[in-house]
Image (spheres, rainbow, N blue to C red):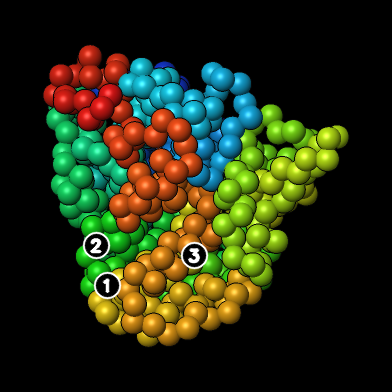
Amino acid sequence: MKNTRIKNIILFTLLVLLFLILKSCDRFTDVGLPKNQITREIVFKDDQLAKSAMAGVYRSLEEAGFLSGSSSGAQVVLGAYVDELQSYASATSDATIFYQLSHMASTAKINSLWTTTYSQIYTINAVIEGVENSENLSSAVRNQLKGEGLFLRSLLQLYLAQTFGAVPYVNTTNYEVNQSISKSTVSQVYAQCREDLETAVSLLPETQAKGSRVYPTKMAAYTVLARIAYYEKKWDAAVQYASTVIGNSEYQLEPDLNKVFLKDSSGSIWQLLPFSSIYNTYQGNVFILNTAPPTHVALRQDFMDDFEPGDGRKISWIGQKTDSQNKTYYYPFKYKQYSTSTSSLEYSVILRVEELYLIRAEAYVHKNQYDLALADLNKIRNRAGLMSLTPTANQSVLINALMRERKSELFTEFGHRFYDLRHHDLLDAVMQAKKTGWKSYFKLLPLPEKELLLNSHLNPQNDGY
């Protein structure tokens, strides 16, 4: 009993320390602290404490940064930046700044996305180094935590590169290295992400059961590898990685649209746990409108108008609220739980199998395998209650259909729309028609002004800023 109490005290102290590290850094190169080696030796002296250190990383991902389900995550910021969300918040709010395209290199949200993500990466690197150097951990836990760390590092670095362009790929906790680190090109980041993910595949378990997919698996790593291949337009690799997951019987399209975002959905590949067993997701609290007019964000009317008639996603994944003036506002309703319940019904879905069908369909189009592309595309359409598309060998027709499906399927999910428009070289054409003041250089966010002043190796600034 005494030993258990001491372990719990140590665990609580370490988690508080992790929280303070992530919250207190003004720039990512400041995360060289703490330098006390005794702390690391305590954390990685047994399996449970090491797992708890990684649990702190998962908690931070849900709370802040790109993968957060809160209003600070990419789903809101990038959704308002492009043509998904309209902001009704104050002029100084993050959502409004990005909605109105008034962001600059000095914008606080630009800096916080950068520093939060690199702080998370620092902590992940600390876990990787800790488990590699520990002689006290079981081989199973050592492999598991290293694999999880490599997966998470690669995914976060991918988001940074997709959002900012050339960025540092940080794979060490060495303070002297990090404070003067230089940028890697986007292609170099992709290559380093692949290397991390391929190692992670060798360390992670194959799958997890429905309802408990809260840790990365081989299938999650293959999913991110497929996404990288999609961004790089390496179509053979995209087919290979996507097919590996699609071919696994544990991961199937959830037939009921209303169950896609439940924690036990068959299509979920990786999810983040809520902070409490009786809580659901931040997404439900951020997006669901209990009153109208909205005070934060809602779906744009032109986004609503683009749904194909009869699309079940418009019925199942979009809610509406009418104000006293009889004006109706629409909101994302993928997550349907607003408040707490007796137990968590929904987890925050980061990766799901539907994306892989769309990636593979596009790869088949570029490989001139049009029948196979249509088969994948129609699986997504049919699940949404739409009729199958007529067979065609017209590549542009199929790409337009794919873009429409990606828009209707993946809306407000961590920036997919922004990244997809740029991937297809449609960002300027679409956004200049929908937003006054859109500039071509908005395809990337600016590097944070504070970081450029502190580390000259991060220059030059992205074009236009």
Q: Nearer the viewer, mark 2 or mark 3?
A: 3
Query: Can you identify the residue that label 3 sits on?
Result: 405
Q: Is residue 331 above or below residue 442?
A: below
Residue at 35%, 44% in the rendered image: 428
Mark 2: amino acid: Lys
Q: Earlier in the sequence, mark 3 or mark 1?
A: 1
- The tag on residue 366 is 1
Residue 1's tag is none
**Residue 23 in sight here:** yes
Q: Secondary structure at mark 1?
A: helix
Image x and y of residue 34, in percent:
32, 21
Callout 3–callout 1 Cβ contact below 8 Å: no
- Distance from disc 3 to disc 1, alpha carbons, whole Å, reads 17 Å
- Crowd band around label 2 with a 10 angstrom C-alpha radius: few (<14), some (14–19), many (20+): some
Q: Secondary structure at mark 3?
A: helix
Q: Is residue 48 visible?
A: no
C-alpha span from label 2 to label 3: 19 Å
Q: Nearer the viewer, residue 80 or 200?
A: 80
In the rendered view of the protein, which quadrant contains the C terminus?
top left
Callout 1: few (<14), some (14-19), or many (20+) C-alpha neighbours within 10 Å? some
Q: Select label 1 or label 2 by which is in front.
A: 1
Residue 132 position by quadrant: top left
Say if mark 1 contacts mark 2, CB within 8 Å: yes
